[in-house]
Image (cartoon, rainbow, N blue to C red):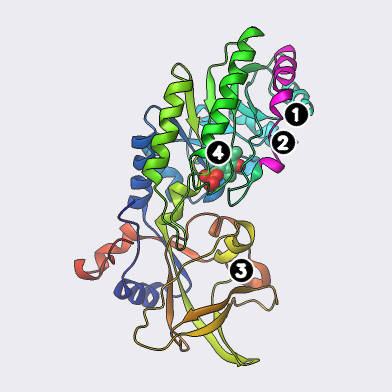
Amino acid sequence: MENIFKLSQGAVEKLAEQYGSPLLVLSVDQIKRNYQFLAEHLPGVQLYYAVKANPDEHIVRTLADLGSCFDVASDGEMQALTDMGIEPQRMVYANPVKTAGGLATARRTGVNKFTFDSESEIQKMAKAVPGGAVLLRVRVDNPKALVDLNKKFGAHPEDVPQLLRLAREAGLDVAGLCFHVGSQSVSAEAYLDALKICRRLFDEAAKDGFSLRVLDIGGGFPIPALNEAIDIAGMLGEINGAVRQYFPETEIWAEPGRFICGTAVNLITQVIGTQRRNNQQWYFLDDGLYGTFSAIIFDHWEFAFETFKTGQKKVPATFAGPSCDSLDILFRDKLVEPLELDDLILVPACGSYTSASATVFNGFAKTRIIVWEEVRHLFAASEQLAAAV
Ligand SMILES: *Cc1c(COP(=O)(O)O)cnc(C)c1O
């Protein structure tokens, strides 16, 4: 994909001067481009943005205006979207194991679409949201995903017929099946396997008297990662072809998270300390593992960054965050041109599972987020964006 949002050096310097560091800069135009790219390559598929990837209000509102629906996983996410005026019909409560508070909020706000993968969940839903529309989450193994969620969630295909019957007997509206191949899945293979399994399960269910009407193919669509070229258009083309082949009559949903928000945010962070320790160069930054870089832990993400230095011999360096915890180390043996105190660093593609899982550990506030399109008038056209990456 071209045109990934990336600030120029001039813009980074000016923004840091004006708003301070660290700073997150969100492009709502990039959110729109990402949404439209998926909508174009998965025609006819209703997109449910997975709010957990980045719940920022600007992102949610931008997507709501484009006609997106939303995958929510907790009472907090349901309430936040309800407060923004998003109708309950546009949400699916896609957490296979729901809390009592979550179910009560679904009932109160009118959210009436759910996923589940066990018998115990059927009893909970039948009681709290009787007659609710439910999708059974099927386990699909995908060891190639960066984050394979199928060890935690999903019913074994063998157990699907029985679980569907139990849900029907409990008075729930059995609408269909769903799967999630795991995050940052870099080939179509796992989706194609899952689609085949689901086709077979749809046919078996039909023999049981069900007319399943919805298939939710989950999220996991990848964003460009370090040193890795992904043919995302080709991948979506393959998925779309298989969907049309196996499910021509079925309503299809998808739950993209990282693909929508990942490339839409840049982090500006600053060197706040330099040291030589045990013969290694160390740089301390003003954002860390407990903040925006939480994705390193929770999402196993390897960030690419830009130091705006050229022409000097690179040295291996360790990068650490600002907290007093020894875990707060971001990169080791990273080859970079030497840095100095106050130097600014740009981390593009910093929008998914970053600020969403940031903490205020040790008293460091969450990094401020500003919207690029609200401040871009401060810049001459020439200093706005660097070339596409
Ligand atoms: C996290 C999650 C997603 C989004 O995954 P991405 O890799 O960010 O696209 C979608 N569906 C479910 C059920 C999830 O848990």
Up/down of 351 relative to 159, above or below? below
**Is label 3 within 8 A of ligand 1 (CB to nearest ligand atom)?**
no
User: In the shown orientation, is residue 57 left or right of residue 110?
Assistant: left
Q: How many marks?
A: 4
Q: Quadrant of ligand 1?
A: top right
Q: Residues within 10 Å of mark 4 (few under 14, many from 20)?
A: many
Q: Is residue 82 visible?
A: no
> Looking at this view, is 180 or 102 the one in front?
180
User: In the shown orientation, is residue 238 left or right of residue 319?
Assistant: left
Q: Which residue is label 1 attached to?
A: 118
Q: Position of residue 150 (x, y in %)?
A: 67, 40
Q: Which residue is label 2 attached to?
A: 97
Of labels 4 and 2, earlier in sequence is 2
Of labels 3 and 4, earlier in sequence is 4
Mark 4 vs mark 2, CA separation in Å: 23 Å
| Callout 1: SS | loop
Image point (72%, 37%), residue name: 101
Mark 3 vs mark 2, CA separation in Å: 28 Å
Span colored in magenta: 150-170
Q: Are marks 1 and 3 in contact (CB under 8 Å)?
A: no
Of labels 4 and 1, earlier in sequence is 1
Of labels 1 and 3, earlier in sequence is 1
Q: Amino acid at mark 2?
A: Val
Q: Disc 3 or disc 4, which is closer to the eye? A: 4
| Callout 3: SS | loop
Q: Amino acid at mark 1?
A: Ser
